[in-house]
């Protein structure tokens, strides 16, 4: 089976009702990104951050995977698929994908603020700031905030390096290191990019499909099935 890597950003979940980042003037669901998504903010107002991610978890509970997530899941019948996502939601899992690299962490998990140990799955449960983890640290969302390492980056880069086909969906390619991943693709690896808007120019040749994720994936599925 050919190796298909699908790199996704907020746009793949937009049609599931989850807002993108840079379409909302630097606000993330009405919060200032600097106050809820940076490691420095955890020292300043951790309670606000816990509340913010509790809200995101509550929202995720009622969101459903859309057709794009589902088509990516279905493609496992024909390809060896790895999803590399910048999204913290679990809509790829629920859409049927089984091999997912969550570069920026996972909303349904928590960990200790001491070196991100004691990772636990809490599903959609909410928690109060002040709860302790087994190692005596403070419980925090298992999210990669700005200013933190991206531990799964090398695993993601390796997947892209081995890809026979690369598909990029719904990311403004603004945030590094994730945005640099496409440059790991082999020179002859076809790259498809699905986004309704003009995306930052890339120096690699890509085939643009200027559509929303659901329509774009419907079109792309037909093309991919011809070259499986
Ligand atoms: N289908 C496909 N793409 C869409 C759709 C849609 N229905 N709606 C919007 N988009 C596109 C936008 O045109 C934009 O190019 O999705 C992209 C979203 O870009 P961003 O909001 O910048 O999101 P993303 O690239 O995922 O952000 C990367 O930044 O804030 C951090 O850690 C956060 O993971 C996030 C990272």
Image (cartoon, grey):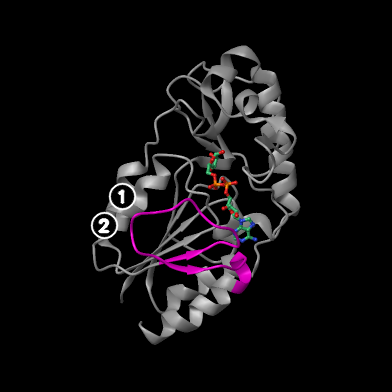
Residue with the most extreme top position: 44
Point 39% across, 40% down: residue? 177
Tell me the SS state at disc 1.
helix
Magenta residues span: 192-215
Residue 26 in the image: state x and y as whole percent.
65, 35
Residue 163, x across and y down, in percent: 30, 64
- State the image quarter where residue 42 is shown: top right
Mark 1 vs 2: CB contact within 8 A: yes
Q: Is residue 212 above or below residue 200?
A: below
Which sits in the foreground, 92 or 186? 186
Looking at the rendered structure, which numbered label has been put on residue 157?
Answer: 1
Horizontal side of 209 relative to 45 (left or right) equals left
| Quarter containing the C terminus | bottom left
Residue found farthest to the bottom: 226
> What residue is drawn where x is 50% and y is 40%?
105
* As drawn, 198 above or below 96: above
User: For the N terminus, which image quadrant?
Assistant: bottom left
Q: Quadrant of residue 127?
A: top right
Name the foreground residue: 202 vs 21: 202
SS class, disc 2? helix
User: Does 129 appear in magenta?
Assistant: no
* Left or right, residue 142 beside residue 65: left
The percent coordinates of residue 82 (x first, y second) are: 40, 61
Mark 2 CB lies closer than 8 A to ligand 1: no
Decide if residue 132 is on the left or right side of residue 205: right
Prevalent SS, magenta region: loop
Residue at screen point 39% across, 65% down: 206
Q: Residues within 10 Å of mark 2 (few under 14, many from 20)?
A: some
Q: Position of residue 39 (x, y in %)?
A: 52, 22
Estimate the spatial distance between the alpha carbons at disc 1 and disc 2, rounded to whole Å. Answer: 6 Å
| Residue to which mark 2 is pinned | 161
């Amino acid at each position: 089976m050919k190796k298909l890597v699908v790199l996704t950003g907020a746009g793949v979940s937009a049609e599931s009702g989850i807002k993108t980042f840079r379409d909302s003037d630097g606000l993330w669901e009405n919060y200032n990104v600097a106050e809820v998504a940076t490691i420095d903010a955890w020292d300043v107002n951790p309670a606000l951050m816990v509340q913010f991610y509790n809200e995101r978890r509550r929202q995720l509970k009622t969101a459903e995977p859309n057709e794009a997530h589902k088509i990516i899941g279905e493609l496992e019948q024909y390809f060896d698929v790895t999803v590399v996502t910048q999204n913290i939601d679990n809509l790829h899992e629920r859409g049927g994908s089984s091999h997912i690299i969550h570069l920026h962490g996972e909303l349904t998990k928590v960990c200790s603020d001491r070196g991100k140990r004691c990772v636990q799955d809490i599903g959609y449960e909410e928690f109060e700031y002040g709860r302790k983890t087994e190692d005596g640290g403070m419980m925090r969302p298992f999210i990669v905030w700005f200013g933190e390492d991206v531990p799964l980056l090398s695993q993601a880069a390796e997947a892209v390096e081995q890809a026979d086909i690369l598909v990029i969906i719904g990311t403004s390619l603004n945030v590094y290191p994730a945005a640099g991943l496409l440059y790991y693709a082999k020179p002859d690896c076809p790259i498809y990019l699905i986004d309704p808007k003009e995306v930052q120019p890339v120096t690699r040749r890509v085939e643009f499909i200027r559509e929303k994720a659901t329509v774009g994936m419907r079109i792309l599925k037909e093309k991919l099935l011809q070259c499986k």
